[in-house]
Amino acid sequence: MLTSAAAALRRWSAANCLTRSSAASASSSPGSAGLSQLALQRRAFMASSTASASSSGRSVAARPPLLLSPAALSKALSETSSSKAIVTLDATWFMPNLNPPRNARAEFSKGPRIPNSRFWDVDEVADKSVIEGLGSALPHMMPDGSTFAQAASEAGIEPETHVVVYDTHGIFSAPRTAFTFLAFGHQRVSVLDGGLPGWVASNFEVEEGEPKAQILIQKTSYPEPTLLPNRIRSYQEMRSNAALGESRAQAVLDARPQPRFAGTAPEPRPGLSSGHIPASYSLPFSSLLDSKSADDKTYTVLKSQTDLWRVVSGALAARQSSWGAGAGASADEGGNSSVDRLRQESSGQGQVAVTATCGSGMTAAVIWLALQQLGIESAIYDESWTGWASRKDSPIVKDEA
């Protein structure tokens, strides 16, 4: 059934309250040419993406914004009469060590949720095979094309469907699913900024009770796609990159909290060492987000483009300073020049210039989403820290106290 957002929010607030550490401060600011060139570069990248889709024989529609506001989604839904033109996916995922545990699918079924949404289970739409060198599988690994196509078909998605992904945190797990769609060449995908709580706070209609969409879905025949090159990094690729050393390795940005990166705080997974991959940078995903509040509920949205630039350039400058790099340059100059270099390496052709990592490949996608706003294309190390630290011969760096 449909209920008012305000009423639903009061019942839902306590269970879904999200707290996070305050955003990391950064003193650097974008250079005058930096942000002024972003619009041109993003148009060039979108043009190259459209050309790629066209050359593959797929019909092409305009690519929607990757980050979509609740108001923009509401407007788009009101202007379409086809159930396949826009599909909203709840891709909520909870950390497995929560006490008490949370069940994202059960909470979706109970509601509230955006009307006619479908649930996208990131741990089911995944590669569950045993990973070489680990002897076990890891959660929510990138699915193969067949698994992805089957899940998209069951959700009633077609290649030209505009897929809007959200979660109940605000911005947390939804970017990973958006990354997956784009990595398989599905250009028409967006992340709902603020997620379900942002939608509710905007007082848009929600649905509760048995999901109506699950009964009415008209399954499609989504064609099996091929994963785009260089979107997922393997363990061996990460080892080879780390071996290049701090001055030559491609940038690796780590989304975990800084104490875990430094090796001064434990990992949430028992028996797993903390620390970081050699030549990587600490960029906690929480530093890329702002907190919002509505009726005593806290949720997250992505920072503005200007603030994202400051945070990313600050993280790069701080790490380079700790390595003794950039002698003679100020933190502002070092950080800004690094961001500019990454954008130039990404270029209008969408070349991957950065790899994002985290604990298990989930919040690395928040870094990916933020870098997209800066015109920087990035890959994700799918196994992330769990895969790296689980191998006894992996080099692990811990910062000195």
Image (cartoon, rainbow, N blue to C red):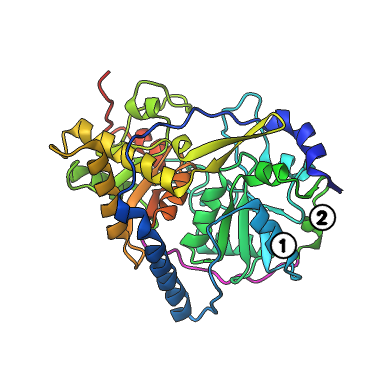
In the picture as drawn, the residue positioned furthest to the top comes out as 401
Mark closest to the chain's N terminus, 2 or 1: 1
Residue at (55, 64) in percent of width and height: 146
Q: Which residue is mark 1?
A: 77
Count of marks placed on residues: 2
Q: Position of residue 79 (x, y in %)?
A: 73, 67
Neighbourhood count class around disc 2 (C-alpha, 10 Å): few under 14, some 14–19, many 20 upward: some
Q: Which residue is mark 2?
A: 212
Please check the rendered image and state whether residue 202 is part of the magenta-colored stretch, yes or no. no
Magenta range is 218-229
- Please state which of residues 113 and 327 is positioned toward the viewer in this rendering: 327
Q: Residue 111: name its quadrant.
A: top right
Rendered position, 182 above or below 11:
below
Q: Is residue 236 among what the camera can see?
A: no
Q: Is residue 392 among what the camera can see?
A: yes
Is residue 355 left or right of 88 when viewed as pictured? left
Residue at (18, 46) in percent of width and height: 244
Is residue 64 left or right of 215 when viewed as pictured? left
Looking at numbered disc 1 in the image, what kind of residue is underneath it? Answer: Leu
Looking at numbered disc 2 in the image, what kind of residue is underneath it? Answer: Lys
SS class of the residue under badge 1? helix
Rendered position, 36 above or below 332:
below
Q: Position of residue 98 (x, y in %)?
A: 60, 27
- Please state which of residues 381 and 339 is positioned toward the viewer in this rendering: 339
